[in-house]
Amino acid sequence: MTDMGQASTDAEKERFAAIDSGLPSAAEKAKQYLWSVLGVALITAVGKAISPFFDITNVALFYLLPVLVSAVRWGRGPSLLASLLGVLSFDFFFVPPLFSFTVNDVKYTLTFVIFLIVGLVTASMATRLRDELEKTRQEEKRTLALYSLSRQIAAKADLDEVLKAFSKTVAETVGGQVSIVVPAAEDGALCPIASYPPDAAPYGDKERAVVHWVLEQGKRAGRGTETLREVAELVFPVKAGKLTLAALVIKLESQRGALSSDQGQLIEAFANLAAAAIIRVRLGQEAEKAQWLAESEKLHKALLDSISHDLRTPLSSITGAVTGLLAGGNTYDDASRKVLLDTIKEGALRMDRFVANLLDMTRLQSGVLKLSREWWDVQDIVGVSLREIRDALQGHPLSIDIPPGLPLVNVDFALIEHVLINLLENAAKYSPPESPITVSAHGSDKSVVLVVADSSPSIPASERQHIFDKFYRLRGPGNAGGTGLGLSICKGIVEAHGGMIWADSVPGSGNRFTFSLPVPNQPFRQPESGEEASHG
């Protein structure tokens, strides 16, 4: 793509050069006059050769050829010269007396006058056509330059890139040093944000004063204008309506007074295009900011709703149980007191898991999550996780399928335990009562894979890709609720370990949540049978 873009730019530069070639230099003009003279000389030689066979009046018609060619190819001056030389050559070489400018017959004088009139009219018409052609060339150049610039900046979303492309195109068009200057938001100081060439010399106090004036007044100033003309730079405002967005500073390489009117119009068109691009980029940034604010508001609402449910529910249970114990006195037997105490414990554990999820998500979002890696047996991690979540799993038959001899995993024990607890709690929350839950594992030389399978309703394919997003919740039995953070935290922790996590549905069997953990080269031997792995 880069090569294609470069080739396209080179082609456009060649077209610009071809358009500019319509303005001849002094040397080229001299060659044009010389070719007119040579054309007349050639017709004279041809006329002398054929004069014995033709009347000299017919020979005079041949002298119109260099006049027509000069008028069409080179304009008024060469064609007038060819016309004048044709008359003189015809008189000198063909009209009696020969080799003299004396004319004895009046009819030849009339021929000379008509010849000159034809040459003058032809030259005038050709000049008008050439002027129209030159005007068309300049229009084509402007169109090509505007098209080239609009194509360069159309796909750019970064303001700096837009203005760099703009300054480069203007510099290549007018031939000089170009900078885009905007006022700083804090103190109004000038801040050049794009220059071409990149190593452009800094501006002095006079130039800064001109730029300040242009930004305040929204009018052009500097070289070739009526305002602050003593400085070497020409400064254009880049405006959108009445708002001046930036200043375009041009320092020409040539020593001529100012830009031509056509160049001035082209620069104004460039400035309007740049203003539109700046507004487009700023509106895009504002839209993105508004989208982030809306998303943030949505997340805040979801978080508040979740806190309202997931904190108030266990708090209400704890408050009710404690109130009953305090007010009941000796009315409760040991079994009833144990039920109330278990309620308090379950509510406290639920709140603990909720707060832990919030803290883990905060650490993941801020990028400060640190892994305390050690070598662990997968069976140990699963065993501890099941003990921590056993209250939430009551009423669900549990099946464990972990073959012996799995490789050790180098992980943060507490974080992987947290992943398993969230997956198991999620399975219990969304599965029907008395439905089974299975925890299984298998491994290879490269990874260990753990699977938590349940009997919950199959997750729709359209929602499967979103369930690991923050605050995304599926509607469960009895409106299971939750913050929608658990699976998102699982994803963040597993990916921080270099693993992957995904969900799929088994028709008629519920859902499976699977995550893999990479197995790096183990620096020590596996525990032998009968040995116990220490949890530190």
Image: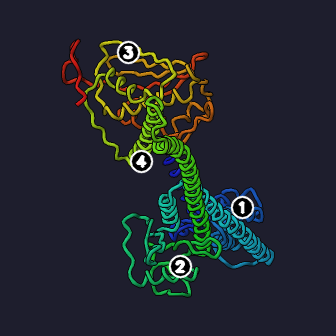
**N-term mark: 1 or 2:** 1
Residue 402 has which mark?
A: 3
Among numbered discs 3 and 2, the one appearing first in the sequence: 2
Q: Which residue is mark 1?
A: 62
Q: Is residue 250 visible?
A: no
Which of disc 4 and disc 3 is earlier in sequence? 4
The structure residue drawn at horizontal position 25% and vertical position 28%, both measured from the top left corner, is 535
Q: CA distance from mark 1 to mark 2?
A: 64 Å
Secondary element at image label 4: helix
Disc 1 versus disc 3: nearer the observer: 3
The CA distance from mark 1 to mark 3 is 108 Å
Q: Residue 102 in the image: state x and y as whole percent.
A: 69, 79
In the rendered structure, are the residues bearing label 1 and label 2 in contact, judged by CB atoms less than 8 Å apart? no
Q: Earlier in the sequence, mark 4 or mark 2?
A: 2
Name the image quarter holding residue 74: bottom right
104 vs 323, left or right, is right
Disc with the residue nearer the chain's start (1 vs 3): 1
Amino acid marked by disc 3:
Ile
Mark 3 → mark 2, Cα distance in angstroms: 73 Å
Which element carries disc 3, helix, strand or loop? loop
> Between 260 and 515, which is closer to the camera in this rendering?
515
Quadrant of the image containing the C terminus: top left
On residue 215, which mark appears? 2
Q: Is residue 95 above or below residue 534?
A: below
Give the residue type that dot 1 points to: Phe
Residue topped by disc 4: 362
